[in-house]
Amino acid sequence: MALNKKISELDQATSVDGTEIFPVVKGGLNYRMTVSQIKTWIGNATASVAGLMSTQDKNKLDGVASGATANSSDAYLRDRANHTGTQAASTINGLSTVATSGGYSDLTGRPTLTPAALGCAPASHVGAAGSGAHPVATDAQAGFLSAAGAQLLEKLAALFPGNFMVLSFQAADAAGTTSAGATAITASMVRVNSATADAADGIRLPDGLTAGAIVRVKSGVSAGVKIYPPTGGQINYAGTDVPFVTGAYAAMTLVCGDENGLLWDTF
């Protein structure tokens, strides 16, 4: 009987349809598997796992033309006009030194940048308009800052430190019920035009000023106005972010007494 034959003595199948059975041993026990099961177990190959080739991958391979990796002539590939991307100048031979150094001293035929060559007065570069020299700045014409002007700016900076604009004015409407929601002050003189009757609205002193900065606030309403310190600051040591409340139509001067711009006093 066929069952008593050795495997080598069995007849060879002329075709395979997947239903054929193979004996297998698993965990010391005998089992059987069909060809279809074995095929499913192996699976199709992926980018990271070996396996069978799918029909989709086979079609892709069939669609690759012979010599596809050399589909342009050598002359075309050597032509730099057909290249994409960029190439570092340091990798190119035959360039002038200035192409890689970027130094003015490496330029050939560079101009002479002297005051005379530029048409300027050779000594101070300052002179009357129309003389070929740069004029001193006036109210009507831009130019160089004179020594007298520089001295005046230094005096003003000493009187009004903290880079706060001298006598700048802002008409503001109070807002919010907290420091974060209050109207930010952007000038050294502020008039509050509106606020709620219960003084819930407020304004907030600017951040970043230094000791000696002065802010003048005028309430233009019949209710008190909350003046908040800069974020994280205090007014009259009343507590962090605690506002100072003005009287109705009252004016108040606030002076910064801290290099970090956080401590303010009322006067």
Image (cartoon, rainbow, N blue to C red):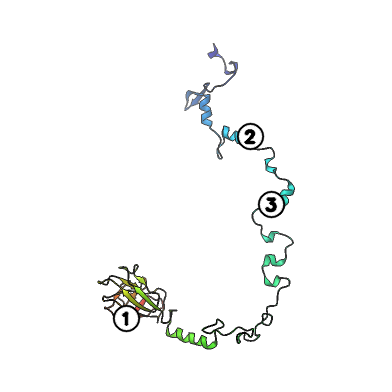
Q: Secondary structure at mark 1?
A: strand
Tag of residue 82: 3
Report crowding for label 2: few under 14, some 14 to 19, many 20 or more residues within 10 A (C-alpha). few
Report crowding for label 3: few under 14, some 14 to 19, many 20 or more residues within 10 A (C-alpha). few
Q: Secondary structure at mark 2?
A: helix
- Of pointers 3 and 1, the one earlier in the residue sequence: 3
Q: Residue at x 54, y 87 (%)?
A: 147
Q: Nearer the viewer, mark 2 or mark 1?
A: 1
- Mark 2 and mark 1 in contact? Answer it, CB < 8 Å: no
Report crowding for label 1: few under 14, some 14 to 19, many 20 or more residues within 10 A (C-alpha). some
Residue type at the position of mark 3: Asn
Which residue lies under the disc numbered 1? 252
* Quarter of the image with the N terminus in it: top right
Q: Residue at x 58, y 35 (%)?
A: 57
- Horizontal placement of 92 versus 39: left or right? right
- In the image, residue 243 sits, relative to residue 155, either above or below, namely above
How many numbered marks does the figure carry?
Answer: 3
Which residue lies under the disc numbered 2? 62
Nearer to the camera, 183 or 20: 183
- Horizontal placement of 187 versus 141: left or right? left
Q: Position of residue 196 (x, y in %)?
A: 27, 71
Residue type at the position of mark 1: Met
Nearer to the camera, 251 or 65: 251
Q: Secondary structure at mark 3?
A: helix
